[in-house]
Image (cartoon, rainbow, N blue to C red):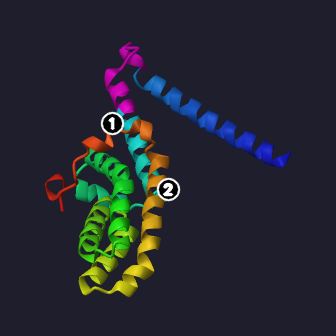
Amino acid sequence: GKLNQGKGQSDQMIDQSEKTAGDAQGTYGAGSGETGNPAANEAAENEAARSEEEELLYRLRTEVQLDTEKGLMNCGSLDAYKEILLIYRDTIDSKASEIEQYYTEKDYRNYTIQVHSLKSTSRIIGAFDISERAWELEQAGDREDVALIEEKTESLLKDYRTLKERMLSVFPVEDAEVEEELLPEIDGSMLQE
């Protein structure tokens, strides 16, 4: 009833505004006699690309819960950010397993090295919750605070693995252009700070 009627009116308003915008575009260059305007086409393509970029960044902020402003700043460009996000996503399983192995073996020296790495790479992409929790566990490892490590490691690893699932909702595996075996480690030379 009323809900559908309201939606219909809204759709009609959108259709009318698109028609009006189309009419305005049509009359803008009417005197030139040109049917195809390359500059207008390029502007439309640039606007569509900007919209796709904005949509991607919006989804990374809302679905993946990343601070995309910091991630972009750390990576230097959207293309570099996307590449580093894919590397990060594709190495979550192996990195989580490594941390888990050192934790289980009570090898706190190597555990601390791995949570330090997790802290840094997570900060770079804007995953500050994971980064801050890894920092806390790095500090615990440095102090040999086994009680804190035992209290917080499993929940960190669970959330780290869940982050991969959230990233997959935005970057499905079929979109990846790289194989995990071929991925380089993320190091300081790839990043801007």
Q: Identify the residue under disc 2.
A: 63
Above or below, comparing residue 54 to residue 74 in the picture: above
Amino acid bearing label 2: Glu
105 or 166, which is in the foreground? 105
Image position, residue 16 (x, y; %): 63, 34
Q: Residue at x 37, y 60 (%)?
A: 97
93 or 125, which is in the foreground? 93
Give the position of the C terminus as an image quadrant: bottom left
Q: Which mark is residue 177?
A: 1
Asked which quadrant contains residue 120, the reply is: bottom left
Residue 29 lies left or right of residue 16; in this view the side is: left
Amino acid bearing label 1: Glu
Dot 1: element: loop
Is residue 31 a member of the stretch shown in magenta?
yes
Local crowd at mark 2 within 10 Å, few (<14), some, or many (≥20)?
some
Report, in whole angstroms, how far the alpha carbon at label 2 lies from the one at label 1. Answer: 22 Å
Give the position of the N terminus as an image quadrant: top right
Above or below, comparing residue 94 to residue 128 in the picture: above
Image position, residue 23 (x, y; %): 53, 27
Between disc 2 and disc 1, whose residue precedes? 2
Residue 171 lies left or right of residue 7; in this view the side is: left
As drawn, which residue projects farthest toward the right? Answer: 1
Dot 2: element: loop
Q: Give the main secondary structure of the magenta stretch.
A: helix
Residue stretch rendered in magenta on the structure: 30-45
Local crowd at mark 1 within 10 Å, few (<14), some, or many (≥20)?
few
Image position, residue 48 (x, y; %): 41, 36
132 or 66, which is in the foreground? 132
Mark whose residue sits in front, 2 or 1: 1
